[in-house]
Amino acid sequence: MAESVPVRCPACRREHVYAAQVFPCACGAPVRPPLVPGAPPVPITHRTWSDDWVTVRCQACGRQDQWPHPELGCPCGTILRIIVRSVASGPSTNAAPPLHIPLPPTVPAPRPAFHPVTIRTARDAVTAAGLYLKWLGYRDVRHVDPQGGAAVGLHAPGLVARVEPSTRRTTARDVETLWLSALAESAVPVHFSLAGYAEEARFRADTLAVPLFVLDLTGTPQPVNSPADELVTAGIGD
C-alpha cells in the first residue's frame, strides 16, 4: 500500500490526504519518495528548476535517481510542496506529484488514461497542455504566436487556451485577456500555469467561468477551480 500523510493547506486550512506516487527504477523495482510524517507542506510562490527535483534511493538496488518533487494543488488555488526525505540533504521540500485525477464512475464512457510528458523546459509545459487538450476531446490543437511575455497560445475549433510556462504567477489581467479573446471567437477559454494563480486571478476566473489548471512536473494538469473540474468531467464529447 502506498505511503500517505495528512496534509493541511496553510492558506485555507483544508485537510487532504497525500499518497506518494510510485516511480519505476531502472532495475524494475518501484521507488517511492519517503514522505516525512507531520512535516507541514510549503506553499509554492516561486519556482526554480533546481528546486523541483529530489534525489531518491532505490531500496532494491541502491541506485539514486532524481524524481519530481511532490506537489498538491489545493482547491483554494494554493500549490503545496510535500516534504520528503532526500538522499542528498535529508528532509526536503521535494516529492512525487499528485496522481492523475480519475473521471467520476458516473461517466458512461470514460476516456483512456492520460499519458503525460515530464516537464523540464518551457516547451515541455506547452506540449503537456496541448496533449491534455487533445485528451479532453479538442481536435487540431495548434500553437499561435505569443503576444508578449513567455505565455503561449493554443487554439482549436471552439477553444482558445493560454499556457504560462514561466515561474510568474498568473494575474487577473491574464485571465481577463484570455476571456475576451475567447469571447471574440465564441470559444471556450482555458488557462494553464506552471507557477499557479494570484488570488484575484482565481476570483476573476470563477466569475467568468474560465477553467484554470496548474501543471505539475509530471506534465499532468490539475484543475484548481470548478469550471476546470466540470471540463475534466464532461470533456467536449465526440
Image: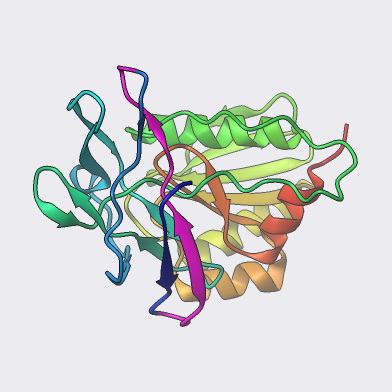
Percent x, y for residue 183?
A: 75, 55
Give yes or no for residue 26 being in the magenta stretch. Answer: yes
The answer to whether residue 145 shows anywhere in this view is: no
In the image, residue 22 sits, relative to residue 164, either above or below, namely above
Residue under the image location 52 percent in, 69 percent down: 201
- The quarter of the displayed image where residue 78 is located: bottom left
Percent x, y for residue 200?
A: 51, 75
Q: How many marks?
A: 0
Give yes or no for residue 69 being in the magenta stretch. Answer: no
Residue under the image location 66 percent in, 71 percent down: 206
Q: How is the image coloured?
A: rainbow
Percent x, y for residue 208?
A: 70, 68
Task: Using residue 68 as the reference point, say whether residue 192 is left or right of it.
Answer: right
Residue closer to the observer: 95 or 131: 95
Q: Which residues are magenta?
A: 11-27
Residue under the image location 26 percent in, 27 percent down: 60
Residue closer to the observer: 100 or 175: 100
**Quick one: which residue is furthest to the left in this view?**
89
Residue under the image location 39 percent in, 54 percent down: 71
- Quarter of the image with the C terminus is top right
Task: Using residue 136 as the reference point, say whether residue 219 is left or right of it.
Answer: left
Percent x, y for residue 215?
A: 47, 46
